[in-house]
Image: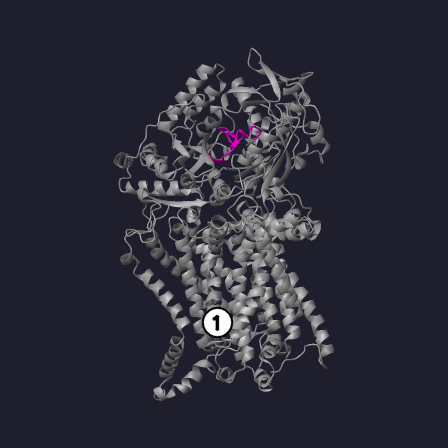
Amino acid sequence: MTIAGEEAPTKAGPSDTGTTKTGIRAWLLAEAPTSPRHATLQRAYLSWLAFSANPIAMAGLGIILTLVLAALFAPWLTGTDGVVQSLEDRLTPPSAAHWLGTDQLGRDILDRIIWGSRITLYIVALTAAIVVPVGLGVGVLAGYVGGLVDAALMRLVDVFLAFPRLILALAFVSALGPGIENAVLAIALTSWAPYARIARAEAMRLRNAEFILAAQVQGASTWRILRRYLVPLCMPSVIVRLTLDMAGVILIAAGLGFLGLGAQPPSPEWGAMISSGRQHLLDQWWVPTVPGLAILLVSLGFNLLGDGLRDVLDPKAGS
Amino acid sequence: MASSNALAGPGRVPGLLRAARQVGGVLGSLALTFLGLTAVTFFIGRVMPVDPVLAIVGDRAPAEVYDRVYLELGLDQPIWRQYLLFMGDLLRGDLGVSIQTSRPVLEDLMRFFPATLELATAATLVGVLLGVPMGVAAAVNQGRPIDHIVRVVGLIGYSAPIFWLGMVALLVFYAWLGWAPGPGRLDVFHQGLTPSVTGLLVVDAALAGQWDVFHNALAHLALPTAVLGTYALAYIARMTRSFMLDQLGEEYVLTARVKGLPERVVIWRHAFGNVLVQLITIIGLTYASLLEGSVLTETVFAWPGIGQYITSALFKSDMNAVIGGTIVVGFCFVGLNMLSDLLYRLVDPRTRA
Amino acid sequence: MKIIKHTLAAGAIAAASVFAVPQASAETPPNMLVLGQTISDLITLDPAEIFEFSGGEIANNIYDRITTFEPGDYETLVGGATESWQISEDGKTITFTMRDGMTFHSGNPVRAEDAVFSLRRVVKLGKTPSFILTQLGWTPENVDDNVTVTGDGTFEIKIPADISPGLVLNALSATVGSVVDEVTVMANEVDGDLGYAWLKTNSAGSGPFSLRAWNANETVILDRYDGYWKGAASMERVIVRHLPEPAAQRLLLEKGDIDIARTLTPDQIAGLEGAEGVTIEDAPKTKIVYLAMNTSEGPLADPKVWEAMRWLVDYEGMLGSFLKGQYSMQQSFWPTGLFGSISENPYTLDIEKGKALLAEAGYGDGLTLTMDTLNVAPFMDIAQSVQQTLGQAGVTVEIVPQDGSALWPKYRARRHGLILAQWGPDYLDPHSNADSFAHNPDNALEAKLTGKLAWRNAWADETITGMTEAASQETDLDKRAVMYRDLLTAHQTGSPFVNMFRSSEQLAIQDGVTGFVSGPTFDLVFYDGVTKE
């Protein structure tokens, strides 16, 4: 077996691992697949069976689903828009009227947490939308084409890997100006590199696989091979990595918010809520503590989910 | 795959040759990486909407004063020229003068970096000393309660926003319980007593035989270490568990067990011996990320480390300080990465194929 | 494996010793004053360059100035390094007599030559605060002729510019009026820099304390000077700790790790009230919080909009909540109670009035504006309150919070819309604020009068500019006071400035610590009177 470059061993591969093994055991549950789509669905279902048997992973999924639901139904779950102030009601402790108390401008903290879930999801989705295509593109191209292209791209990847991540993000945000989109851009810029490495390793492993050679013989263009074969096959490891990274993304975004470089007031971004509430830690502990717990919970959710996904999709990958 | 000693057998001479070539390659890419690092940092500094002149003269400066300092800083030059001038100075070991401290950046780095080094080292130590045994215990007892506990504890440590954890820790252990001293590296009345040799207060105080300062420094170190160490511990425990699970599933472990070797020997000598290299890589990575990633912890604990130095320099557009700091942190980061990489390649048989 | 065992052992020892530390009795030493505040603004300790709050404060305790104020009395100007002065009949020359028997920390005597050297040095180095002296008409070329030693222990200054001598004497009480030790400074001169590089991080004064160490963003440590002319201070050492987090300051105060917390928030002060062992003291300051409008173009050029804005701020609501105790009403640009001030605060929150004015100006259907401000308390909170009340009148405001390092360049380049910021005088004379808020002789972008707030907001009112100039030239004190009152009233109702609040420092002081004086300006803070029981 060839391990690509300096990559830690990733013996990943959706086709020949856990999914199929479980599939064989559960084979009797289904008729022989009648179409490729049937096979795909079947495999997905079986993965789900494996996944749902794992209580920790299911807990993670539960947390993330709650987050998504909170974001979706925010207008119905909250009494206020989370921004409107009420200076008479400032810093009230948790009560029947305000389940999680109010902050220094009299805003209901629970409402802000719920509205903030949209921001969290937005950050996560936007980061993924930038990181995955860029990382995957660079990695697959480098791994498949090889040679000079590979060397040049990998040097670039190294430079970005070498950068102290938070400091680079800080510098980018200072350069671009504070705000969620800029924070996301900065985070994405500092986190696409590992994806390129993963994808490159996969591509190098696969480029001499028979079905790729067959496609080449049939005259498929490089572009087509990358898009139709390599990218889809890299997806499982990328998704696992992405899910596990999401916690990190949330934490960095919160850290930027904490330093005043992320989301800006009155936006109920959780990191910014901790930041502006931290002066009240001694007397009104709930003001900074609640958003801290929210971040903890969601990033825990992503980690649990990622762990579970990895066990199903990519059971042997180390990280 | 059996365990093997990397430098034994007929592969030895080519191994050394390859090592030499690899060291050369590593140095080459190190140089390239640094060029990239300085360039990116420098250009970011120049496109920032922050005005380095105002950082020096203040916002009420009359136009004449402003214009003079603008010229003094060489900001009228084309940007590539400024970069070349900067690199020239850099190669001569001159990192310039910091705006925020009015002192040479190099001098600042000698003061701020050891503070971070002290913290990161202590936290990594905590992470290794607790994380490795936890990870091994979880792997050996896979699926049992202890495994679940280690996994969840590890995940929580890995998921908590560190600045928040720090705040809560200060509240509980300093404000409420009074077990730990407050923010900062030393109590004020111990400040400025110890001659700086290494810059690591704990070491310096021990060298000078000032045991009260030593104790004070150690006490101040405890809480930030615990917070940062939680993160290190979580990561290391998690990786150890995963590596150990891989090994425990291998045939040679089964063989050893069948041979009747004591379980202690099987786990620690055979399995653990084989994950050691991977583990060192992970520890190196953790150490590197703690060196760079302690900005938030430093902020919360008023720890005058390099993360705080760079952050406050960024806010002041003090680019000499930012670049100087980034180079040092980048150097450690890249250095540690490459070192563990190299170690990995030299020792791990699979990557030598 | 052996390595691991050893590290394990070492770790265990380390861990054990941490817990074995006997917790120091949480009290600062009796001969030491420990202050908790922010010193991140400190970038230089050279009195010719200092223009930052912490720098001015620390310099006041290291140096004696030519003129100064006694702690507690900020209306009577007194001699610092000088004993007395004589103003010539035409008001164009002032002769100073040095105080007898003063010595610098180095042991050198304080001479007239040192005073002359210090003033010339400020003008020749030409750092930012030099404008305080160059407004007298001094230039690097003519300063040697205008500031001269006239005899043993006397020197005189000539005032080429048309400017009241009373204002000149007030200006000499600024940090640039500090007398430095010529012999020591020149001994450290490098390449003709007049000792600039050295004095940035060292001290050469005659004040109650000398600088022991300045660790940026960490501490400033001062040592007592036993030969101080007023008598040595009671505290042997003063440690100024950089504690940017007010919560941390409060924690350290309650634990007894600091003696005085300087920058607590109103909520923390409220939390401390009734706490044992801590006293809260109020020290009114001269910083003014204002909202200004860039009148370059658009709706903000319309005086009706200016007037509307003044009715759309919830002054009372803010003062009653998050600003409580640390700000007071101040709707004119010179603090009430000081020479030449007014006490009228005619505006209150009146949404209907504001709406009506906006409708009159043609913006009845609403407006969208941006508001730049600093990303720190209380600006963020004030901005959000103003955003809300303006919103009720149909004005949509987008807040753009930023660090000062990003805000000032924008402001100086007139690229802001609304701006919420603060201003404090450079010395205790109404001209210091009037010159900035009201005086704008050339509104052209190329004129680059970037130090003036009126210019930054592209607002030039000929009448008001004229009033400012006349007041600065008036030699009769009483007339001068009346002229400033008229100016303040005209500015209050006819400028694009919404002056809102005046700041007040709330000091949380450990019981038993007395004598700390925090005057109205940042550079009138006195450490030397502090005693501990």
Q: Is residue A200 above or below residue A76?
A: below
Rendered view: C150 above or below A122: above
Q: Report if residue A156 is visible in the image.
A: no
Residue B258 rendering spot, x and y as whole percentages: 58, 86
Residue in view at x 52 percent, y 27 percent: C427
Kind of residue at badge 1: Ile
Q: Chain of mark 1?
A: B
Can see residue B101? Answer: yes
Task: Name the one closer to the observer, B265 or C100.
Answer: B265
> Is C14 on the left-hand or right-hand side of C302?
right
Q: Quadrant of the C terminus of chain B?
A: bottom right
The image quadrant of residue A201 is: bottom right
Q: Is A305 in the magenta? A: no
* Element assignment for label 1: helix
> Which image quadrant for residue B3?
bottom right
Position of residue B289 measured from the top left corner of the image (x, y, whole percent)? 56, 60
Name the spot of residue B213 as percent of width and height, x first: 64, 48
Magenta part of the chain: C506-529
Q: Residue at x 67, y 64 (%)?
A: B28
Q: Is residue C486 above or below residue C218?
A: above
Find disc 1 in the rendering and name its residue.
B146
Image quarter hosting the N terminus of chain B: bottom right
- Count of marks, rendered view: 1
Horizontal relation, residue B98 to residue C264: left or right: right
Instruction: Using residue C244 as the reference point, say whether residue C109 is left or right of it.
Output: right
Give yes or no for residue C526 being in the magenta stretch: yes
Rendering quarter of residue B333: bottom right
**Image coordinates for residue C496, horizontal then vertical, percent:** 38, 32
